[in-house]
Image (cartoon, rainbow, N blue to C red):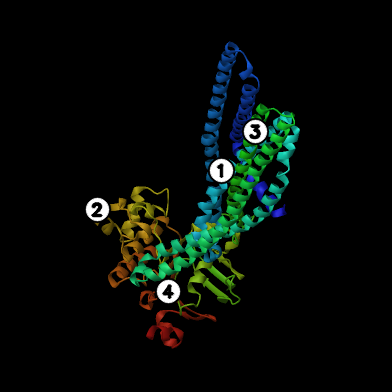
Amino acid sequence: MGKTKANNLKKMISYYRPYMGLFIADMIFATLSSAVALTIPLVVRYITSTLIYMQPDALKSQLLLIALFLIALLAVDFVSRYFIGNYGHVMGAKIEYDMRSEIFDHLQKMSFTFYDKAKVGQLMSRVTTDLFDITELLHHGPENILLSLLKIVGALVILFGINAKLTFAAFIILPFMFAFAYVLNKKMRRAFRANRQRIAEINGQIEDNLAGIKVVKSFANEDVENEKFKVGNDNFLDSKRNNYRYMGIFQAGVGVFTSMITVCVVVVGCLLIADGNLNVSDLVAFLLYIGVFTEPIKTLVDFTEMFQNGYSGFERFREIMNMSPDIEDSPNAIELGDVEGAIEFRDVSFGYSDSSDNVLEHINLDIPAGSYIALVGSSGAGKTTLCSLIPRFYDVSDGAISIDGVDIRNVKMKSLRSKIGIVQQDVYLFAGTIYENILYGKPDATEEEVVEAAKRANAHDFIMSLEDGYDTDIGQRGARLSGGQKQRLSIARVFLKNPPILIFDEATSALDNESERLVQESLEVLAENRTTIVIAHRLSTIQNAERILVLTEEGIAESGTHEELLNMGGVYEQLYRG
C-alpha cells in the first residue's frame, strides 16, 4: 500500500472518532447478526442428524424448544438489522455533515486565485456526490467487512468440525478467486476515479449552462448547448461502460468461483458418502454452511464497488482539503482598529500565477484619508486588479500596500475587509428577500438600520412599491429586479456596512440614464467623508473627482483633475474625446 493511500485511509478512519460509541454499538449488532447466521445451520444439522430419529413425543417437545430458540434468534437478528439500518445510517449522515462542513469552511478560506481556476459545478460534485459515496463507504464498509469476516471465519471453523476433507475441497478454489479479485480491483480503481472526474465535468457543464441560460436563449443556441452537453454525456457514458465492464467481469468471475466451491463440495461429498466417510445430514449441513461462507464473499464483491466509489471520492475530497489558501493571516496579524483611510502603494508589482507577465509594475501611489480618487484607462490596464489588492483578494508580487501606515499583510483579513466596501458593476445578490440581501452588509443590524440604508441608497421607494416590500423574494441572483434596482440594493448593503474605505468598480456603466442618475446620487452620498476609489468607464461620472489617475500598461501615466488632464493633451484627453 502506497504512503498516500495509507495516509488517506488513516484520515478517513479519523472521522469515526466523535461517534466511537455509535460505531462500536454498530459493530456489536453486526456481530450479533453474524452469530445468528452461523447458528441457524447448526440447528438444522441437529434436526437432520439427531432430532428426526427421536421418539414422536420427545421430538415434539424438543421441536417446540427449538422453535422458541429460533424465534429468539430471529428477534435478535431483527433488532440488530434495525440498529445497523437506522442508527448506522445516522452515524454515516453525521460523518457526512462533518465532512461537508469541513470542506465548505475550507472553500470559504480559498483565495480568488483558486476560484479563478475552479469550476463551480465540479466543486459542487465534491460537496454532494463524492461525500455521499464516502459516507456510504464509512457506514457500510466496516460492518460489511466485520459481517463477512465473522461469517467466513465462523463457517470455516464449523466446516472443519464437520469434515476436514470437504473443507479442503472448498479451499482449493479460494487462492484463484483472490488472485482474480486482486487483478480486477486495480483496474476498477482507475476506472472509478476516471468516472468521478466525468461526473464532475458534467456537473460543471450543467452549472455553466443554467447560470447562462438567458445568454443561451438570447442567441437561440440551445442546439449548440445540447451538442456540447452531448460530448460530455458521451464521455460519461464511455466511462460508465468501462466501469461496468470491469464490474461485470469481476462479479461474473466471483459468481463462477463461488459456484465452483459448491460443485467441488458436492462432488467430494458424494465420494465420501460412497466410501462411508460422511453421512447425508453432515453433507446437508455442510452445504448450508457453504451458503453462509459464499454469501459474505458476494457481499465483499459489492463492497469492492462501494470502496472504489467511496475511496475515489475521498481522494478528490482530500485534493481540495490539502490545498492551502495562498493568502492567509500571518501568525502575528493584528486587528485593524479605527481607520482614517489613508492608502499607500509602495513600488507595487503584481502578476497572476498563471501568467509570466506582470499586470502592474512598480506602482507608487498615495491616497490621503477621505479623498475621492478616480481610476481610468483602457481595458486590461489593471484598474480592477489594483483595487483588488487593497482588500487582499490577491497579494502583491512585490512591494507593499499600507492603510494608515500599517502593511495590510500584517492585518487580519476579516478585520481588513470589514473596513472596505465594494460596489461592483456585476452585482451579486443572493436568493432570498430584499431585506436579507441588504442585511448581508451587517448581519446584526436592526430593521430600522436596514430601512435607513435603503433610503440613503435611493432604494426605499421602489422597494415599498413592490407587493411584499422588503419581504419580496428577488429570485436567483436578483432575476426579478432591474439592473438599477439591483445596483441600489448593493449600495444599500454597503451603506449598512458603513466602511471608511470605498471602491466603486464601474458601478454605473451598465445602467440606463435614469438608473445611472439615481445610482450616482446614492454613490455620492455614500462617498461623503470616506476614502473613495472609483473605477470609471464613463468619464462623465468622475469629472468632480479630486484626482484622476490614468493607468496604462506602463503604470500610472497621468495624474490630476479633469481640467488639468485635458490641458495635458495626453492619454486622458484621448480617452475623453474618443
Q: Secondary structure at mark 2?
A: loop
First of labels 3, 2 by sequence position: 3
Residue at mark 3: 289
Residue 399, image x and y in percent? 61, 71
Query: Which kind of residue does numbered mark 4 sit on?
Result: Glu
Residue ID for mark 2: 467
Q: Residue furthest top?
A: 57
Using residue 255 as the reference point, say whether residue 6 is left or right of it: right
Q: Nearer the viewer, mark 4 or mark 3?
A: 3
Residue 141 in picture, x, y percent from top left: 61, 42
Q: Is residue 485 left or right of residue 281?
A: left
Q: Quadrant of the C terminus?
A: bottom left
Q: Earlier in the sequence, mark 4 or mark 3?
A: 3
Sequence-wise first label, 2 or 1:
1
Per the image, the residue denoted by label 1 is 95
Q: CA distance from mark 4 to mark 1?
A: 56 Å
Disc with the residue nearer the chain's start (1 vs 3): 1
